[in-house]
Image (cartoon, rainbow, N blue to C red):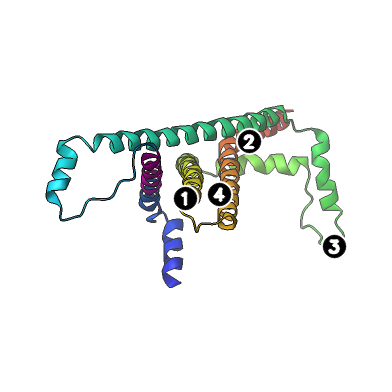
Amino acid sequence: MIGLFNYAEDYLRGNSMYSPVSRFLNLTLSVAITSFVFRKVYFDYSLLDIIDYKGMCLFFVNGNFAVPLILFTILHYGIDFLAGSVFSLATLHFTSKWIDRINSFKIKKRDFSIFKVINRNPVIPVPAKFDKGVILKYYEPLKNSIPQEEWEKAKKVFEKKKKEISRNFRLALKGMVTLTVFLISVPYLGLLLYFITMGLLLTSLGFFIYTFVILEVTPVLLRKLDSEIAKQVSA
């Protein structure tokens, strides 16, 4: 259990083994799918004995390795391409909708009426009166207090997280394909475990899309808020 917490801490600090593990898992899933397709399309093979050096040499010299290698390449990159296409289309659809809503957003006078409720709060008296003037007065100093280097660093973190989310989505989708293969090839998997796992994977796909869209539209939202507040300052 302590090792698990250490692993989580390393991941949060950016020193995780997650990336190599995910690549290994991605490769393993592709091998499992390739093995299933090969058995269905060609024949039920058996692995060569590790001490059968002659058999191994003939496997490569006679070109027998070509068929599984080509099949693996097609499936490995083909599924990844399809998963990436699904992810791009889904995120583009939701991102476009959110950006349209953000671009149509405008700050109006009535939006500042909420501060009247805060100022009249009888339960917790506020130390100062909040109004449009106070917000606009302190917004510019607050914005300028954040160094440009911090904004650039935040952009890099956003881009890194977006790439990681995209990889996770493709891996989860490939896991769904592999799980379906296992349902056919592994008799004791069972429908209950299959549907539970598929439900979890589907939930993770939705979570990845939602998180990616949030990261994608956040800079647009910040720019829009900055623009709208700037208009209120100059008004």
Q: Earlier in the sequence, mark 4 or mark 2?
A: 4
Find out whether the residues at labels 2 and 3 contact each other: C-beta distance under 8 Å: no
Identity, as a three-letter code, of the amino acid under mark 4: Leu
Q: Main secondary structure of the magenta part?
A: helix
Find out whether the residues at labels 1 and 3 contact each other: C-beta distance under 8 Å: no
Q: Earlier in the sequence, mark 2 or mark 3?
A: 3
Spatial CA distance of label 4 from label 1 is 15 Å
The crowd level at tag 3 (other Cα within 10 Å; few <14, some 14-19, many 20+) is: few
Q: Earlier in the sequence, mark 2 or mark 1?
A: 1
- Residue 125 shows in this picture: yes
Give the secondary structure at mark 2.
helix
What residue is pinned by disc 2?
221
Identity, as a three-letter code, of the amino acid under mark 3: Val
Spatial CA distance of label 1 from label 3 is 60 Å
Q: Which residues are magenta?
A: 28-40
Spatial CA distance of label 2 from label 3 is 33 Å
Snapshot quadrant of residue 10: bottom left
What residue is pinned by disc 3?
123
Q: In the rendering, at what x and y percent does residue 198 appear?
A: 57, 50
Find out whether the residues at labels 4 and 1 contact each other: C-beta distance under 8 Å: no
What residue is pinned by disc 1?
182
Which disc, if any, is residue 201?
A: 4
Find out whether the residues at labels 4 and 2 contact each other: C-beta distance under 8 Å: no
**Residue displayed at 57% across by 34% down:** 91
